[in-house]
Image: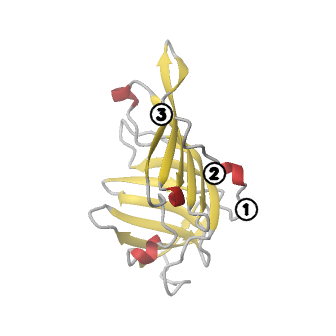
Amino acid sequence: METKKTFETPPRLPDRWSTSYISYWQPMLEEDQITSGYCWFDYSRNVCRIDGLFNPWSEKETGHRLWMSEIITVNQGLTRKVKIAYTKEQGTYQAVSLEDDVDACHQLLLAQDILIQNNATYAGSHTILGLETDAWTFIRQEKSPSTYYFEQSTNHLIRMVTGNPEQHASVRDFPSFNTQTIPDNIFRCDYTKV
């Protein structure tokens, strides 16, 4: 691990970005799952969307896996969750649409300046997914410690780790991070149809 810092202050995330993600745990315990999905963030429009299998989610306790698409529209103060349960019957998964949820929501799932808000400190240079990265660590009030890894000399997020990897930590990898324009239809949501 090198300690050469390429940013004097923690980076802000790009104004808009999207990526596939892989969600897993470190170390992986018996009940833990690895899942994946896709997310889109547009801070200029104050919206985000995440689609994928929910993790953590106990199939053993609930009897199903849960796929969810969540769109948060801060300007409207709302979030909508479209959910599908996947129940295994005789070795085959059956998909069952669940009722959508519409709830109040006044902030995006990941703030553009999360590192600055939480006084993140530089945690060295690491190779993640074959890329040289700068790591920044912080602790949010009453939360576990977090370390975010950005492709070196950029504000492109490559990995998020929440918790202590020596005990049990949530890991999110972002292997296809990009800042291309996000089409309007990605965030289209009719909050009246529930």
Give the vertical position of 102 relative to 127 (above or below). above
CB contact under 8 Å: marks 2 and 1: no
Say which residue appears at 66% left-offset and 57% top-offset. 176
Residue 148 is left or right of residue 180, and the answer is left
For the view shown, which residue lies furthest in the front direction?
192
The residue most toward the top is: 90
- Residue indicated by mark 2: 187
Estimate how packed mark 3 is, as few (under 14), some (14 to 19) or many (20 or more) residues with alpha carbons within 10 Å: many
Earlier in the chain: of badge 1 and badge 3, it is 3
In the depicted structure, whether residue 95 falls above or below residue 109 = above
Q: Amino acid at mark 1?
A: Thr
Residue that badge 1 annotates: 181
Say left or right for 66 vs 44. left
x, y percent for residue 175: 62, 56
The residue carrying pointer 1 sits among few (fewer than 14), some (14 to 19) or many (20 or more) residues within 10 Å by Cα, namely few
Residue 136 pos. (x, y %): 45, 73
Q: Nearer the viewer, residue 62 or 133?
A: 62
* For the residues bearing labels 1 and 3, Cβ distance under 8 angstroms: no
Q: Which residue is mark 3?
A: 66
